Amino acid sequence: MKIHRSSGNIRRREFLQKSAGLAAFAAAGPLSLPAVLSAAEQPNTRKTIGIQVGAVSFVDEGTEKVLDLLQERGAVDTIYLTTFTYGRGLAGRQISGHPFPDHGAQESDEKTFHGGNYATPHPEFYRDTVLKQTRAPDHGDLDIVAHVLPAAKKRGMRLFCSVEDVFRSDVPGVKDVAEVDLPGRRTGTLCLCHPHVRAFWTGLATDLCQSYDIDGILFFNERNGPLLNALGASHAQSIASSRVTCFCEHHQRAAKERGIDFERARQGYAKLDRFIQAALKDQRPTDGYFVEFWRLLVEWPEIIAWDRLFDAAKHQVLAEVNAAVKRVRPGLQVGFHIEHVNSFNPIFRATRSYADLATKADFLKVVVYNNCGGERYANFIRNVGSTVFRDVPKEELLRFNNHLLNYGDEAKLDELASAGLSPDYVFRETQRALAGVQGKCKVLPGIDIGIPTGKNSRQASPDDTYAAVAAALKAGADGLILSRKYSEMRLANLAAAGRAVREFKG
Ligand SMILES: [Zn+2]
């Protein structure tokens, strides 16, 4: 409680420092001065109600109109503006094969979408990296941060730049800094140990914080280490034991510093690959699948060590981004997106300590997407149930895993996708995160609104959205972030989220 109070005081001080500009805000727009003051006067009770929005929505629908809708329907006070990504999870219109929501352009941008930096990259921040040319060409000369920021400020809304580690292989420089896989091939993903990659992420964060008067950065990195990738131990991935990364020279050097034997790591992953491939062909080891897997880990501890090495590089990037932002201005906030696999994979959970993450961030956006969560959790169970836990009937594996994760009474495996995960799941995962961070950073659960699911999977009704938002707030969250992007959300669901927020605030 103490820590919450003091961080509230910091926020209040910052607000008061900025308040010289209040008169100008009031004169410039529809903002009422008392409304802003009342928000600042209750810094300890203020909950962040955020939403993730990509540039295309402001282009398609008009900035003022979008902000009106977000405030009026969603009770939103904070914009997480997708500023850097080459991915369509956060940027672009609705992905193809799914119905458009009831706002925005009703035409796919799949063919014209490119991605990159939707703000203006300033070259002085990218001197130490080959990744210099990342400007997104999608909307011509438009600088989305310069465009949306004054409009949001005028309304007293806060704005964070969302930055995501999703690249495309044709970006100049990517080939030079890409990961190397088990057989020694260059991939399309960036090596997080590479000095140019680290310089890129800190350069980008510094550029955005220095060049624009934003409130901070929300950093996304959903990349898994080689062990999980080998097992396909995530919801959205295939089992890729032959393509695990990274075995580049920088990882070799980092391994040497830690006393990890590179050759044994490679041999261990080659053995793991053979185990996985045999399992997929139903070739049961004499002692069973789980025992054989565990024996591999015991005999080849370099498998775990190499996975830890990947995590260490990923977490170092997080820490460096945080430090870079604080160097610009200590009051700027840094948040990390904590991916869905952290929720339903106990092996991944074991590698992520909320208490540790809390030392690197001001807030964690913890994914508790319950609607698409049913489909994703079922995929995860089927993946691990086809290799390591192949001897266990999948329904029993699901029940067992529910116990490990402290999930409540969720649907059976064959009904999980159509049922989704429950609001109780949102409540439990929010409380777990709050207990984990021990007040050292804020927890903002990511709430699923309209994240595309399969044809036979659950499509969330407004009541579903209402229940998820209410569960997160009831659990004691410091706020929430409506996800993944406004361009895939139906307005009735957005309004249901806003209704839950307003009722909670009374
Ligand atoms: Zn590497």
Image: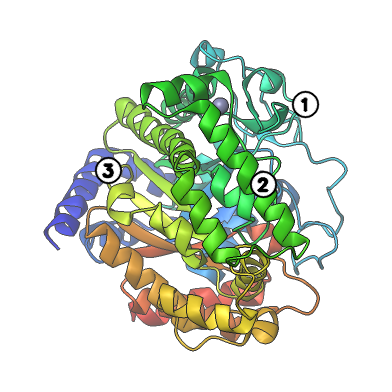
Viewer-closest of 299 and 411: 299
Can you name the residue that lies furthest to the front here?
286
Image check: 178 left or right of 11? right
Residue 19: mark: 3
Viewer-closest of 476 and 320: 320
- For the residues labelled 1 and 3, the Cα–Cα distance comes to 45 Å
Which of the marked residues, 1 or 2, is nearer the chain's N terminus?
1
Residue 391 percent across, percent down from the top left? 62, 74
Quadrant hosting residue 443:
bottom left
Image check: 187 left or right of 363? right
Which of the marked residues, 1 or 3, is nearer the chain's N terminus?
3
Amino acid type indicated by mark 3: Ser
Mark 1–mark 3 CB contact (< 8 Å):
no
Which of the marked residues, 3 or 2, is nearer the chain's N terminus?
3
Amino acid type indicated by mark 1: Asp
Residue 126 percent across, percent down from the top left? 53, 16
> Residue tagged by mark 1?
170
> Residue tagged by mark 2?
273
Residue at image location 71% in from the left, 42% down from the top: 242
Image quadrant where one finds the N terminus: bottom left
